Image (tube, rainbow, N blue to C red):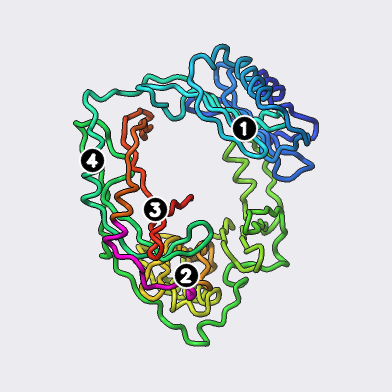
Amino acid sequence: MANKLQMAQQIGSISARDKLVIEHQGKDNGNVLFVWEDTEIKERFITVEIANDGKLMRLEKENVISENRSLSEVYLKEKVLQFVGDHYPNAAEKFVSLEKKVTDHTIQYTYSQTVLGLPLPQTGFLVTIMRSGVIKYFRYYGMTDSYSIPKQIADKQQMISDYLQEVKFKLCIAECNDLLHLAYEPLSPFLCYQPADLSKKKETIDMKEDDGDTEITKLPLLVDHENVVNINDMIGFDHASFRKIRESDLGTMIGTVWRKGNEPQSIERSLDGYFKNRNQNTLKIMTDKKTGKLRGVMSLIECDGPSVWTIEACRKRALQFLYQLYPFAEQFFHIHPSDNQEAEKKTFFQFDTMYKGVPVRSGVVNIGISRVTGHVVVFQCPETDLDILECLNLSPSISIEEAKAIFNAAFDVKLEWLKDEGEKYKLVYRLVFPDLIDAHSGQLCHVVF
């Protein structure tokens, strides 16, 4: 272990201000993971993973500080290949170079093993280098023989025809390119990856929920005295009992982590031990950067005791919480069926957003309640801004038949390899199609998650 630690320190260019926080050996493969945290710059980590035979498997530098310079791409690629060659001689010759990904600050090079001219995912190696010449990320996967070539590949045009016969459409409200749209959403029983092997059956999913068979219940109105509950009280937060231990900029949101009680005393460096110490008795709160509104809650505060709150009382508390955040909640939300069990210490409730009978995609609210304390321990807000729903024209300008014609013209399938849960590769057709079709303009929309 000591030799691997010394090797990892050298590879990661570890300085005196970097503190070793994780030293963990995997039980399955024997790989050793080392993680250092910068004691001066918050959320700056250096990760090095060394294989059981001493080979470098992974190097990652998060929030790394780099010199303000931009070197030529020719030099950067040479440095990448030299770095890889130092750890895996002739690796670049063993694998096929794929298309590089270029950003303002980094270039990512990917080399992969190919079969039938198609890359096998998670083979070869991947390197991200900063414009200044700092290796930001390296991951080595290597070679594999865990794949099988079909004796006969299914016909592409037949695959397309089979899919298009089954696809249906429903109206929804969805966000695309930062704007809300009334759109047609395609629905199909086929999974997005279909076996290319002609001897295999097509893979399908249960369409009951998408067909509208799922029972949903309108939100009940709460009388005034039921609705006057303080948000901080409901999440179990008061400034006197908590200390802010870190804060992060999450783009449109600010994430703040508060800890109740004293710092954990354990100095265990295992992976589990590190995250247990980091999360012990913490309350994570996300707020909107512009408005300051609550956007998310995750409580990891330990609370022992009997489940004194009934499931129905928890349901009422979830409704109170929802109405505090959204005073006109009954206009937007419906209660999704829940399956809470008496033996569980927590209950969870889902609320689906629907505006004037049209479902809102990415409009789900999840609320979890502790049956011990009655506190909200989980809250996930809808991604859609409810305030602008009333600006939408909910009368489509194009018919379902027109939307289907637009969809059919854009639909395609692509042959590629897919790694299954058993770590084996199978040849599949990936279905390529637009996520949405604007119900007014007919514009295709691809949603990026």
Residue 202's disc is 4
- Helix, strand, or loop for circle 1? strand
Quick check: is 100 in the magenta stretch?
A: no
Q: Is residue 107 left or right of residue 262?
A: left
Q: Are marks 2 and 1 in contact (CB under 8 Å)?
A: no
Labelled disc at residue 216: none
Other-residue count near label 2 (Cα within 10 Å), few / some / many at <14 / 14–19 / ≥20: few
Q: Nearer the viewer, mark 3 or mark 2?
A: 3
Q: Residues within 10 Å of mark 3 (few under 14, many from 20)?
A: some
Of helix, strand and loop, which one carries label 3? loop
Of marks 4 and 2, which one's residue comes earlier in the chain? Answer: 4
Residue under the image location 53 percent in, 27 percent down: 110
Between discs 1 and 3, the one toward the N terminus: 1
Residue 313: horizontal and vertical position, in percent? 44, 74
Residue sitting at the far top = 90
Q: Which mark is residue 435?
A: 3
Q: Amino acid at mark 2?
A: Val
* Foreground of the two, 339 or 115: 115
- Label number found at residue 308: 2
Q: Which region is colored magenta?
A: 389-404
Seen in the picture, residue 283 relative to 34 is either above or below; the reply is below
Q: Inspect the image, locate mark 1, and give the three-letter code of the amino acid beneath it.
A: Ile
Q: Label 1, on which residue?
A: 107
Disc 2 secondary structure class: loop
Is 233 on the left or on the right of 211, as rendered?
right
